Image: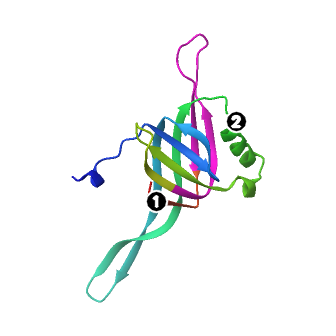
Amino acid sequence: MTADQDALTAARFSITIDGYEIASFSELSGITTEVEAVDYLSSSDKEVIFKKLPGKAKPPTVVLKRGKSSGLELWAWHQSVLSGEINIARKSCSLVMYSFDGTPVARYYLFAAWPSKLEVGALRAGSSEVLMETVTIVCERLQRVAP
């Protein structure tokens, strides 16, 4: 493998809207894009042909996790969805993956994205564990772009 084809490693992930980093994350649980497979059946005099064809595309999703911080940007973005202000909530943004030295190694552009789910994990009082926050972001289209 050449250096260009090495497997990516990342130390941090961020969501940037309008050039402003609204949140930084320690874990990317996944980026999902999917097209439903549709059955197609055709026949002639001699044979029946069964095929799978691409059907409806499902909205791409991104799931990110981080230690809960005092920042309110992510919550405010999700609150606009909860309030029914989806036109305000839809934001085009970048998901940037950074290496251990802080250099961007990958970038995805999310078109008309909005946080569909925001989850704050369980935590026991007196525990030394970190309170974790998970966000699921849905978008209309996702594009891999140069870092």
Disc 2 versus disc 1: distance between alpha carbons?
Answer: 28 Å
Q: Is mark 2 on a helix, strand or loop?
A: loop
Q: Is mark 1 on a helix, strand or loop?
A: strand
Of residue 81 and residue 68, the one placed in the foreground of this image is 68
Is residue 134 inside the magenta stretch? yes
Question: Image point 60% across, 29% down: which residue?
Answer: 68
> At label 2, which amino acid type do we have?
Leu
Q: Name the residue beneath numbered marker 1.
A: 145
> At label 1, which amino acid type do we have?
Val
Where does residue 133 sit, x and y in percent of width and height? 58, 32
Of residue 101 and residue 27, the one placed in the foreground of this image is 101
Quadrant of image for the C terminus:
bottom left
Question: Image point 60% across, 40% down: which residue?
Answer: 23
Q: Do the residues labelled 2 and 1 touch (CB within 8 Å)?
A: no
- Vertical side of 22 occupied by 145: above or below: below
Q: Main secondary structure of the magenta part?
A: strand
Is residue 114 inside the magenta stretch? yes
On screen, residue 114 versus residue 46, left or right, reads: right
Where does residue 126 sit, x and y in percent of width and height? 59, 10
Picture quadrant where residue 121 is located: top right
Where does residue 53 sit, x and y in percent of width and height? 40, 72
- Vertical side of 51 occupied by 4: above or below: above
Question: Image point 55% across, 38% down: which residue?
Answer: 24
Q: What stretch is highlighted in magenta?
A: 109-137
- Vertical side of 122 occupied by 140: above or below: below
On screen, residue 113 versus residue 86, left or right, reads: left
Q: Name the residue beneath numbered marker 2.
A: 72
